[in-house]
Amino acid sequence: MDVILVTDIGCHGIIDKSFLTHTVHGLHGRSIALATGISAALNNPSKKVIVFIGDGGATIGMQHLIDAAHNRFNMTVVIHNNMLYGMTGGQPSEFTPYGFKTPTLPEGGQKTGYDICKLISSIDGVSYVARLEGVSDFSEQLAEAFSKKGFSMIEVMEICPSYGVKANPGMKLSKIVESAGLSIKKFVDNETEGYHTVVHADRKSLFSNDDAIQPGFSSTLNEPLRLMFCGSAGEGVQAAAEFLLKAGVNSGLHGTKKGSYPVTVGVGFSAAEVILSPEEILYTGSPNPDVICVTSADGLQYAKKTLAGMKGGKLFIDSSLDVPETKAEIFRFPFREQGGAKNSSLYSLFYFLKVTEILPMDALLSVFNENKIAKKFDLDKMFLAFA
């Protein structure tokens, strides 16, 4: 890839769908940190990393921005500055100018907002810094910034149509910018050398084939299998998925895993999608699983829509739960009663493998018994319950 696009949380994030390519979409304020890692790994100034971030994201990730400029990482950062947090209701950011009103700051800003161009241009070694008003075609200025090696940045002044205009009726963007003392100009335009990652050729690569897992078992699987575990946080969902993944790889298969859970980790649902295949897999997750294991009410609620769309496949579900509408083949077992809530997902994993036999049970036991979880898990009790 010659161009890598990294976007942030915020209203500007809808820019993703404007491109006919994938983008890397980071957490709020972390897009520049992600871009830094990408830039360092590419280690090639002819590859262009472009970051789109709002003034809210730049406020949260200010240290990432300063650090990227200070180290001259090869990237262009485009800051969409509409002077408030638009996506969350119009709270002020550190870019909100003096006197500028927002829904949560009706009296207007009581301090001067950041002059980010002045701040970044003071850092030695940056290649390009400019501020413009985003009211016309400014593609030539973007192209100029993109053409630079090292670190470049453009601040695009905007006004939020949902909150900025309503809170400041009659005010024009140009007047706001002028009143804030923010100059519309090019601050820096230099030819500089970008960041060079020091490569230690004497150190072993993390991707060395020497560390490839040598299969000790074989699988009967001759086509991809997509399985989803759905349960509650703290009940072994992610662990069950990882044991299956490792057992699959240990049986000569390729595998991927994708975990899903609420932002507040440790509460609510927990889900994990595993794909096993005799062929190489280039993605994670699947909206159309072949098998779903549901072990709690949280998991059932999470999986209900997916289950309704299944035209076949298998559903392994705890006996205490109502079976939802689905065309999947149903397998019911008291996972929670027999194994307890904490081990219910592990019970569903072993039960699934006992029924389907897509892998040797010994393949699963070999990876399971190496884990500390096995020391507190009664395998004999479980297999007796399955009998």
Image (spheres, helix red, strand yellow):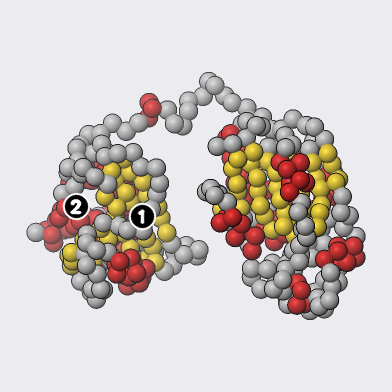
Q: Closest to the observer: 198 or 235? A: 198
Q: Residue furthest top?
A: 202
User: Badge 2, how many Cα within 10 Å: few under 14, some, many 20+?
Assistant: some
Is 230 situated left or right of 202 in this image?
A: left
103 up-or-down from 12: above or below? below
Location of mark 2 (residue): 353
Badge 1, how many Cα within 10 Å: few under 14, some, many 20+?
A: some
Q: Amino acid at mark 2?
A: Leu
> Quick one: quadrant of the C terminus?
bottom left
Residue occupying the point 74% across, 30% down:
193
Real-space Cα separation, disc 2 to disc 1, in angstroms: 20 Å
Is residue 269 in view?
yes
Q: Seen from this angle, which residue lies furthest front? A: 137
Is 89 left or right of 362, judged from the image as shown? right
Q: Can you see residue 36?
A: no
Quarter location, residue 61: bottom right
| Helix, strand or loop for disc 2 | helix
Task: Name the residue nearer the viewer: 299 or 290.
Answer: 290
* Picture quadrant of residue 156: bottom right
Q: Is residue 382 left or right of residue 74?
A: left
Q: Position of residue 238 (x, y in %)?
A: 36, 55
On the rendered structure, is 108 left or right of 331?
Answer: right
Please give the name of the residue rendered at 35% of the width and 42% of the height, measured from the top-left corner: 281
Considering the numbered disc 1 on the image, is that residue within a helix, a strand or a loop? loop
In the image, 26 versus 140, the foreground residue is 140
Q: Which marked residue is nearer to the observer: mark 2 or mark 1?
A: 1
Label 1 sits on residue: 286
Q: Residue at x 86, y 66 (%)?
A: 176
